[in-house]
Image (cartoon, rainbow, N blue to C red):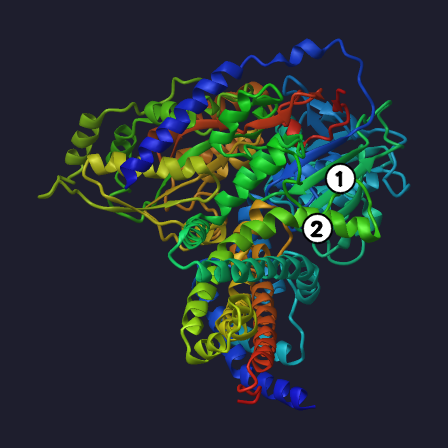
Amino acid sequence: MRILSLAGRRLAASIPTLILILIGVFLLLQFAPGDTVDAMMAQMGGGDVATAKELRKFYGLDLSIPAQLGNYLWRLVRLDLGFSSIYGKPVASVILERLPPTILLMTASLSFAFFFGLVFGVIAARGVNRWPDTLISTLGLIFYATPSFWFGLMAIVVFSVYLQWLPPGGFEDIGTVRTGIWRVLDIASHLVLPTLTLGLIFLAIYLRIMRASMLEVLNLDYVRTARAKGLDETRVVTRHVLRNALLPMVTLIGLQAGTMLGGSVVVESVFSLPGLGRLAYESVVQRDLNTLLGIVFVSALLVITVNFIVDLIYARLDPRITAEG
Amino acid sequence: MDLTRLEINRRTALLTSAAIAANVINPMRAFAQETPRKGGVFNVHYGAEQRQLNPSIQASTGVYIIGGKIQENLVDLDANGQPVGVLAESWEGSPDGKTVTFKLRKGITWHDGKPFTSADVEFTAMNMWKKILNYGSTLQLFLTAVETPDAQTAIFKYERPMPLNLLLRALPDLGYVSAKHLYESGDIRQNPTNLAPVGTGPFKFVKYERGQYVIADRNENYWRPNAPYLDRIVWRVITDRSAAAAQMEAGELHYSPFSGLTLSDLARLSKDKRFVVSTKGNEGNARTNTLEFNFRRKELSDIRVRRAIAHAINVPFFIENFLGDFAKLGTGPIPSTSTDFYPGPNTPQYAYDKAKAAALLDEAGFKAARGGTRFSLRLLPAPWGEDISLWSTFIQQSLGEIGIPVEIVRNDGGGFLKQVYDEHAFDLATGWHQYRNDPAVSTTVWYRSGQPKGAPWTNQWGWQDKNVDKTIDDAATEIDPAKRKALYAQFVKEVNTELPVWMPIEQIFVTTITAKARNHSNTPRWGSTSWHDLWLSA
């Protein structure tokens, strides 16, 4: 019950932010020259003025900007995200179609980055300034500095073109119809390369945070006490240090959940995945305001949810922090 | 910064041209003796998803590449670029040019089993071609009615003479027929059939997963005997060009149409025996690179300035070093691939001559101030392709050398159209002019005055010339083919003299296709056609 009321309060506190973000994005897109009808004519390679006028009326673009914004917000109050002009169907269903691949890719690469960042961070911290540390830190830096599209393309060239181990793109195999576990395995095999590509960049960040935080905690008094008690080093690390060192990592996950939604445009394009990032990019190019605002709305909700979960995890990791604090 | 970019691109382009030259003679003919093989799945690169798939209401290659396999047109072009009947068996124009009669093929059914009749043609022509279809609405402006005395006859009635040759050359693109019984009620644009098309073509629509793929299967009841050969076509949505090239190499894709890969990947794959990289089969999709002048800038309204700008740009150098064998020197709005209308190269041309350019500018009164600057311009490049971006940088550097600093302002598609063709917020603009087999379809609108503000790819330059307007109008209704050709030659001469838009480069799209494909690229608009005879060797 306490959790529920907490969730309610958090959501209520986020609503003003959410509205501000939506209004901001709406106005920002008004500054971009051209509207969805211009974008449509660009795509068609022609079109006459009478048709354009008719279409503008159909999409409600003939109204003044405050009226358009007012209409949008009023629809939102009734939980209606509107109609997508590129897809010709409700925005909610367009986003819902794209959500599973996005969330799969996001959770897979975040878990990958988190897990390996943690493991390598601990190894680096324990061997600080010796060769494992140097090796891990250098590799981390290389991953961080490499552009993801290049990483993705190289992964395709090596694993799909030369070795032919993994599919070069797409979400699942279209040639054969699979069900149950076979479909799961098929989708998984399609997600290996994108997950690695997206995850490696984040891995570098997690690794460095984990290393720094481990080094800090290792120097605290209670660790010295634990060692003085005669505990062996592994026990000290796993039982006493790790838990406290994890707090910054958890904070980071909360922050990055948002970036990952937007930041995967490149990876989605390279691996032809039908995700939210590409949808957002397309909506901007096609000036599909409803879809773009819908994505912002859903992403904001996701970020709020993730941050809420993060707060709960804090409390679990460190009982001194209460979720209500 | 621009210089380093220039160097890199020049190197890539050089590689490209060498590689393509090696591949010009492709070995397609050697397979003529093989027996066609039935079956197989053909995987196609689909680079830019459209809002819908019905070619009766949207004329663009992005729609034809899918919709053109499912729906069919009245006529198409044969291997020599001449009109050949598809849904129409024969046609006849009346002497006054105001009536065109089409006899339709018998025994054709829609994919849902209903018979195809002249009522479908009448409905599509009056409600889609005339009212919605881009370029169709201009072509059919004077279409008053389509009479259907029987199920196999459609008589097109025009208020003004319609040259039969114009109609037959426009209909391959602008003559796709939709089923009346599916579109009769409700708003045509919002009809769900647009995303699940039903046609008479060799392939039946199966599934469209937005952002991923489109699938169509062979039509067992197709009207051509023994066709089609393929079991299935899959269009895969791949927006990243480099990723598409990798998928070609991994064998996941068989065909990437309409220059869908990067110039450097085209060069690389053309050396690979598994692929054929060629401009063949795209002759009907010729385009020219443009340089558009805004006459609202007083400097540009002076013809000497426009000519000076043309003289200042070394086009042959640009083509050789950046575009390679995919492009050639253009001579005006009608490209040399258009055998019926090309007036030859003997119209006013502007050869590279920097001294002449400087002299013309001096003469016009724009002498170089201290620091060498005469006046500065804003150039808006269209975002349609790599070549436009290179071309705009080349223009910038060339004009810089004669004392005209150019600022390049980049936009996405919608923004470009809005700023150039509606708000006229440009000095120079550069993009593509698509030539659609007859100058009256999408070429003369670039020059005819009186275009409504906001109509993209039309005369929005603030320029008007009575002679040009008259030539265009006369040619549009001239029914004698020889006289029409002469009128268009005169038109090219006039616009090359006045130079409201300069079209100095001709390009044809490049196809990348698996070497296993047979009967491909055998017509001038092959990528858009129905592929009824396409097959894959084992």
Residue in the image at 68% along x and 49% along y: B52
Judged from this view, the residue extending furthest toward the front is: A230
Looking at the rendering, which quadrant does residue B161 occupy?
top right
Residue in the image at 48% along x and 27% along y: B507
Graded by Cα atoms within 10 Å as few (under 14), some (14 to 19) or many (20 or more), the crowding at tag 1 reads many
> In terms of secondary structure, where does tag 2 sit?
helix
Is the residue A8 above or below the residue B59 in the image? Answer: below
Position of residue B230 measured from the top left corner of the image (x, y, whole percent) = 79, 28
Q: Which residue is mark 1?
A: B177
Residue in the image at 62% along x and 62% along y: A107
Position of residue B489 measured from the top left corner of the image (x, y, whole percent) = 46, 23
Residue B432: assigned label: none
Image-based side of A150 in relation to B9, left or right: right
Amino acid at the residue labelled 1? Val
Position of residue B515 measured from the top left corner of the image (x, y, whole percent) = 65, 21
State the CA–CA distance, disc 1 to disc 2.
42 Å
Q: Closer to the observer: label 1 or label 2? A: 2
Is the residue A174 above or below the residue A298 in the image? Answer: above
Q: Which residue is mark 2?
A: A188
